[in-house]
Image (cartoon, helix red, strand yellow):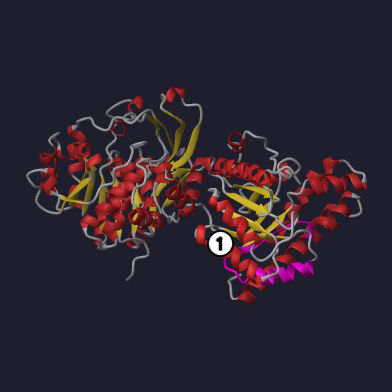
Amino acid sequence: MMKKLDVITIGRSSVDLYGAQIGGRLEDMASFSKYIGGSPTNMACGTARLGLKSALITRVGDEHMGRFIREQLVAEGVDVRGVITDPERLTALVLLGVRDQEQFPLIFYRENCADMALCEDDIDPEFIADARCVTVTGTHLSHPRTRAAVLKALKLARENGAKTALDIDYRPNLWGLSGHGDGENRFIASDKVTKELQSTLHLFDLIVGTEEEFHIAGGTTNTLEALENVRVTSHATLVCKRGPMGAVAFTGKIGANLDDGISGPGFPVEVFNVLGAGDGFMSGLLKGWLTDQDWETSLKYANACGAFAVSRHGCTPAYPSWEELQFFFKRGIKTPALRHDAELEQIHWSTNRIGNWPEMRVFAFDHRMQLEDLADEVGVSRDRIGPFKELCLRSVRDVAGDKSGYGILCDPRLGRDALYAAAGTGLWIGRPVEQPGSRPLRLEIGPDIGSKLAEWPVEHVVKVLCFYHPDDDAAMKADQEETIKRLADGARANRLEFLLEVIPSKVAACDDQTTAKIIERFYEIGVYPDWWKLEPMKSDAAWRHACDMISRHDPYCRGIVVLGLEAPEAELVASFEVAAKHEMVKGFAVGRTIFAGVARDWLAGNIDDQTAVTQMAEKYRALCTTWDAARKKSGGAA
């Protein structure tokens, strides 16, 4: 019977809080970036990014950090049937920092943590039977309860003909050999730890570790002797990681020196952060091993994934996608500091984004100037605009229900409470930053872009509207391009997606090439939007030119949404039918066509809240139906 899973990893799961400042003591870190962590968790994500069907067995707390881990695993494509929510214990935390090229201080917050409560009852025989491989790490062999769970999983795996692998992953203070402040220490000799490890080594087909980790497994600080001692108790392939010198594999007899082992090509990169590098290495190795590659190729994958990890911030966030890895092999190293390789980083970002949005039905009520003018016209306070935007959100949620592919555009100045209420609902959320109507483009968030965007939740998308035309004079182009470039860079630095909306028709006459020329220009200056928001062009040629230009420069772009420009519904229907023929166009982002008349009536007091919600939901639902019908007519999936 075909196995549903390629690999199940078992063990630690934590939230990593990485110091954002580089080159200082952990004591002097002022802010932290939050990632998922723990070796088995990292490996589950790392292998999933490389295309394996991966799963994790662990425990997390019944709190925000536990939910964060679960949500991130799902977003990475990891099967979470084995992730158990512990009602009594907290999710583990780790604080980490990059001090210099040699020092990477870390503190484990793991006192009675959730993942160390893993027990035999958590190991489901049917789940284990689903996997071609079970991979465990050394920490969960350090405690009788977790050790029993691991041994049960290994026994079931072997009974079901699955492969088994061990990443020794030796952390002395997690074995109780040193204090909390010694998390960085990778080796303390211990006969007890050696005995515990050696009693399990015969259960594995693959054993992986650094030289120091084989020292603890083999009971000697002579690496060759340690490997020989491990070989006495295990027939596994032994893979010894040697840092900058790569790694070697021994499938049988241990040679007279380490160079007698099988090796794969190495990748000379700048060492920026070694934390999590071993988990990246193991992810690449498992990809090769479980797809029946030879050891040279498997080690090539492993070395490359390790190289990505040491050159970037964080553990799981640093690991490559399969597409990225293939690009790297084909093109090679341009700069040893991989995180400064713009071409590579763009592929890394765009192939590892969270979430999937093949269809986009967005209600845009981020309008500020128009609603302020309307409030003034009907003689009511502008304070009424915020509550109206909450009604807009209610209408979206009424239409969307629990279905995917729906979203909002909402501003924080007038629509703050609606934005707060939308958090965590599953809606796509875009936020505008432009001063309404400004040309040249000016931003409401001011010139200090990076610090302002640092306050945004990572689920929010930075949206900017620019009135831009290819025939603009040089000064206007330079001004607007510089603003958009800084904004795009600020969004990326804060791990926020970026939507660029361009409207050339309000500036000058347009033809079938106008929008394509604008798209090409922004790619030329290094702006790679995750999303484009474009006018409802009436010509199929105009859409074809625009879509081709995006595909040529950024094949991983999320896609295009069509704006409405307060067009009558009949015109939108016609524009949808043209746009929906193109796969790059994912849907619409329409506002005034839905809310304009309702807003006037509600602000004037002619209709109540529920009537406003109902009327907008009807209009929004009709547009969604129109889009879906246009997509279906064009042959696409709605």
Quick check: 222 above or below 568?
above
Q: Nearer the viewer, residue 204 or 474?
A: 474
Q: How many numbered tags mark residues here?
A: 1
For mark 1, what is the residue? Answer: 549
Which residue is drawn at the image coordinates 57% and 40% (left, top)? 490
Which residue is drawn at the image coordinates 64% and 50% (left, top)? 429
- Residue 430: where, in percent of width, then height? 65, 49
- Residue 372: where, in percent of width, then height? 83, 45
Could you classify mark 1 by the number of other residues whose Cα lies within 10 Å: few (under 14), some (14-19), or many (20 or more)? some
- Residue 16: where, in percent of width, then height? 44, 38
Type of the residue with mark 1: Met
In magenta segment, residue 558: no
- Residue farthest to the front? 474
Q: Which residues are magenta?
A: 569-593
Q: Is residue 580 left or right of residue 225?
A: right
Quick check: 555 above or below 636?
above
In magenta segment, residue 583: yes
Q: Is residue 66 left or right of residue 597?
A: left
Which residue is drawn at the image coordinates 81% and 49% (left, top)? 370
Confirm whether residue 39 shows in the render: yes
Q: Label 1, secondary structure: give it.
A: helix
- Residue farthest to the left? 256
Q: Is residue 361 left or right of residue 357?
A: right
Confirm whether residue 554 shows in the render: no
- The quadrant of the rendering that contains the N terminus is bottom left
Q: Nearer the viewer, residue 205 or 19?
A: 19
Asked where in the image residue 453 lies, by quadrant, the reply is top right
Q: Nearer the viewer, residue 327 or 168?
A: 327
- The quadrant of the rendering that contains the C terminus is bottom right
- Residue 95: where, in percent of width, then height? 43, 32
